[in-house]
Image (spheres, helix red, strand yellow):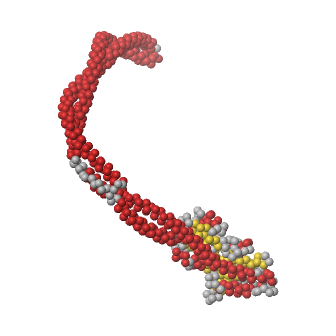
Amino acid sequence: MRLKNNSILFKLSVLVGGGIFILVAAMVLFSTLNARKVAIENAKAEAIAVSNNYADQIKHKMNKAMLSARAIADGFSYVAISGTNTAISREQAQKIGGQVLLSDPDYLGFTICFEPNAFDGRDNQFINKPGHDATGRFISYLTKSENGGYVVEPLIDYNDPEKAPWYFKPKEYKTDFVTEPVYYPVQGKMVYMVSFMAPILGNGRFLGVTGIDYTIDFIQELVSKSPLLERGARISILSNEGVITASTSDSKQIGKSLKEVYPDSYSKQISDIKGGKEIVDESTDWLDVFVPIYIGDSKLPWQVRLSIPMSYITANAKAMMWYQISIGLVMMLIGVTLLIFFLRRLVSPLYKLVNVTKSVAEGDLSVQMDDNIPNDEIGLVYLSMRNMVDSLREMITNIREAAESFTQAASQMSQGSQQLSERTNEQASSVEEISSSMEEMTASIQQNANNAKETEKMSFIAAEGGKKGKESVKSAIDSMMLITEKINIITDIAFQTNILALNAAVEAARAGEHGKGFAVVAAEVRKLAERSRAAADEISQFSSTSVATVENAGKQFESIVPQIEKTAELVQEIAASSMEQNAGATQVNDSIQQLNQLTQHNASLAEEIASSAEELNSQAQQLIHMVERFKI
């Protein structure tokens, strides 16, 4: 629905109401966005604080194990300070470790590993004793038994730096160390665990290590009990080398390296972990908070990752936004209602003017105007309308008179145009018939000219052929005369050969028996000479007959060639006359075609004039009909 098709009241209501709506909407939008921004910032700050608090809880749980191991390590360092006379025994040291192990149900194992002879200098007395191996070195590993006690086993792989980082890293750094998740045999079963190791130092010298182990399952259970999961959060714990030790989003990732899970961003993530950076990222639909954890005195931090959905963070902001939008809509409805009430009273005088304009629109120019109109802008419009009605009444009267005169003139023009059109059409028909006949005559002349040209060409070709035939006959006669001469020579040769054959036969007869073979050859040569002479005589007779025939043909060609040349000259004259006739007929035909086109054009113009006159008459009648609807 377009605005221009509605009342002024509606337009003013829409425009002013729209302005109120835009103003209120802008205020609500600004307030909502500001409130949403503050709510989101507060929620993010709360999420970050919760993340740090939860990281502190995890850190506290892990630090408990590290502090316990550190306390035992500090107690064992007394051995190096006080000497062997007052030192505790190995059995007592194992009992101390056992008590620490049993003090917390989450502890998996307790490690005591000394350098050779570093505890009491008596390694050779403890060979293969409980918690010792064939070296006698104090390398006890304590784990819980089913009856509530503990089991003591010797450590394995403690001499291999790659398999025992729990020993060699504290020895290298001389500070607390948290191992990466590793598999280690506990009472014959492989367990995936993390160790919290503390070095035993005496007078600055490394003596050994103590440590407490946690299973990976315990760490996973620790994050799975977090109340943050009820908010849709995701929690994971990563070691210093990027191994996932706990994950609430995908338990299949536990034990995997970040290099397997995120190969594209592995370098940056491992750098952030080792650098101990606290990271807050909200580039996705989640608020990701990465908090480093330094356990004990270790310089190799772990990382706790907490991801909270932005939908949860922005929930309060959305509720506030809809509350403010509702308040804005109520205020806008009240304002628009008051606006329509006052505008209706303001524009009521316009309805009187509307009734007048409706009467004028229906053709009633005799309407009486009301003078009880206020002297404001609406009153000025009303006065202008009255003046316009008076002017229209006078103008309609003049249009009626002019339309009647115009109708009579248009009718006369229409009749004359019809007669002119009929006569022009008859003339155009006659010209078309003449043009058609002239085109046929021109085509016949053109055909004759073309045939004459073809005959002329054929006559010249025949004349040239006769001349060439005459020359060929002469050449044939000369060739046959030459053949006759050559045949005479052959005849002479055959005669001489015959004489020679006779002489040879005579000489062969004289030779008797010795000349018989030569006589046979001479007889054969004589036969060949006689056959050659006979053939030459026959060719000579045939050549004489052919020469006579060719001479006769040559005489006939000599008599025909002048006649053919004369015929060609006559045909040439006919072709030239035909071309002249064709040119003249073409000019006449072109002139008739132009006349035909002009006649057709005139006929078309006459028809258009007649049609326009009829249309003009029809429009004049329509104009009279239109002004008749006005009452003056």
Snapshot quadrant of residue 396: top left
Q: Position of residue 531 (x, y in %)?
A: 37, 16
Q: Is residue 239 left or right of residue 114?
A: left
Residue 201 against residue 18 in the figure, above or below: below
Q: Please name whichever residue, 87 or 59, is drawn nearer the observer in this view of the structure.
A: 59
Q: Position of residue 283 (x, y in %)?
A: 55, 64
**Quarter containing the N terminus:** bottom left
Q: Is residue 9 left or right of residue 79?
A: left
Q: Residue at x 55, y 71 (%)?
A: 43
Q: Residue at x 65, y 81 (%)?
A: 109
Snapshot quadrant of residue 379: bottom left
Q: Residue at x 74, y 74 (%)?
A: 174
Q: Position of residue 627 (x, y in %)?
A: 23, 45
Q: Is residue 621 visible?
A: yes
Q: Please name whichever residue, 602 or 23, is drawn nearer the observer in this view of the structure.
A: 23
Q: Position of residue 362 (x, y in %)?
A: 24, 51
Q: Please name whichever residue, 179 or 227, is drawn nearer the observer in this view of the structure.
A: 227
Residue 292 against residue 140 in the figure, above or below: above
Snapshot quadrant of residue 560: top left
Q: Please name whichever residue, 362 or 65, is drawn nearer the observer in this view of the structure.
A: 362
Residue extending farthest to the bottom is 147
